[in-house]
Image (cartoon, rainbow, N blue to C red):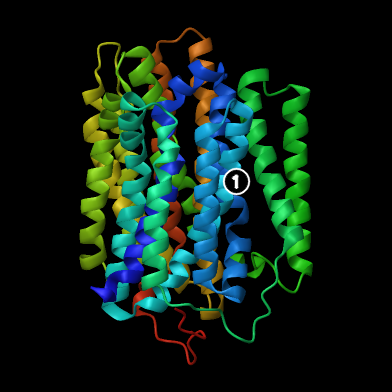
Amino acid sequence: MRKWSALTAVSIGTFMLLVDVTIVTVALPAISRDFGTSLGGLQWVLDGYALALAAVLLASGALADGHGRKKVYLAGTVVFAAASLVCAVAPNAGLLIAARFLQGLGGAAMLATTVAILSVAYTGRDRGVAFGIWGAVNGAAAAAGPIAGGLLTEHFGWRWIFLVNLPVSLLALWFTVRGVTESHGRASENHKLDLAGTVTFTLSAAAVTFALIRGGDAGWAAPSTLAAFAVSAAALVAFIVVERRTDHPMLDLHLFAKPSFSALMVAAVLAQASAFAYLPFTTVWLQQFLGKGPVDAGLLGALPMSAASFVGGAFAGRFLQRVAPRWTIGIGLLLIGAGALMQARLTPESTGKALIPGLIVVGLGVAAVLPTMASAALAAVPHERSGMAGGAVNTFRQLGFALGVAVFGSVFAHRLEGRHAPTDAVNHVVAIAGFVALAAAVLVLLVVRTGRPAWEAPKPAAEPAVSETV
């Protein structure tokens, strides 16, 4: 049906770019063997992509509002495909990591436009269904990455996890050209690229991630670790100063004066970290310590979550439309926390099947949290800032994944270096994820006061300018 063409186009692209956040997890051992890369280097294969996504999402959203969301989405897809090809042919880890950053830049241009495209294309109950399906795709993609990565790595080699993006990109381009209507932000807004804000935000996020990874390798008191933390703090201060002074900020800091919006942004960071950032380390446990192949590791470590998230998301979009967002998000985070803690009870005799019940519970929590968090952020801000709010949710989610991988990687490596059993290392990582999710649930239930989902909010007096393109 042409009615759902825009949703199809956005879902294909979103699935592809989010799969690439986690698709490399089961390929890490193979990449390590080919390139001789350390654990820290492997973390950058994951974090380079997630950081680039987080760093330029908001700037991409501003460009899309000014120059056309469809145009930016198409351009991002082309960049993503080209970077995927470079990843596939990379002769060393350095070029692979650089290409992953470039992939993230293209992915950011795509992801920054998704919420706005859906908001323009659908209204009322259709918008609720669209956000529900899009949220299910979000959760399923992040969890399905290890499954796809396992199948491709085991049967074709790890380079195919990037080559497969080329035909999918072509499919996304085709549906976008045919099914997405061009749209812009309000004509009164002067959409300019906040270069200073983008640079300072990127520097702060990259430096703190480097510090967290470096701290696990060289020690938390090492000069390089302390210097990285100092650079991150200085860049964050510079970012705040820049955003307060510019007329066209990539992130309007006044939005954080709203307690609900602030709590949602913190919850976005913590939700993504607690639901997904521990998966690389359970995958390492399955492959390197239990001897599972990439396919088995992907199936045991991700399929239960992926299936539960997709099925739960489809029902969430239809039946939870009239539930206050804080209850949906808060209960979803409680499920994520409970599911993680269920997985943190491994013993030396445990098999991969011990993860399955907890992964199912986490998947149900993800299905409730992701679509509702996006719509709640839109409802918490003025309509003219909806594009910025949608971009902020995605930015903080990806930042949460990058920081989570760095923190959990340090914990995992420290436990292994201390001659603890591999199951002990996994238990510590997953338990931390569980308590992080529970803390986020408490924050949301106590602070968020957005009364109703965004798709039930009254329409603004003037809709964004929309023009049809071929």
Camera-nearest residue between 160 and 131: 160
Camera-nearest residue between 161 and 50: 161
**How far across and down, in percent of the image, does residue 466 sit?**
48, 84
Total count of labels: 1
Q: Quadrant of the C terminus?
A: bottom left
Q: Residue at the location (39% across, 28% down)? A: 26
**How far across and down, in percent of the image, does residue 407 sit?**
54, 32
Give the image quarter of residue 348.
Answer: top left
Write down the residue under mark 1.
102
Evaluate whether residue 275 shows in this view: yes
Q: Amino acid at mark 1?
A: Leu
**Left-right relation of 21 to 298:** right
Q: Residue furthest bottom?
A: 461
Q: Quadrant of the N terminus?
A: bottom left
Evaluate whether residue 265 shows in this view: no
Assign a secondary structure to mark 1: helix
Q: Residue furthest top?
A: 419
Measured along the vertical axis of the image, is residue 440 above or below residue 264? Answer: above
Q: Residue at the location (52% across, 10% down)? A: 418
**How far across and down, in percent of the image, does residue 350 sit?**
25, 16
**How far across and down, in percent of the image, does residue 366 sit?**
33, 49
Q: Residue at the location (61% across, 86% down)? A: 187
**Left-right relation of 73 to 199:** left
Circle 1 residues within 10 Å: few <14, some 14–19, many ≥20: many
Q: Residue at the location (28% across, 45% down)? A: 363
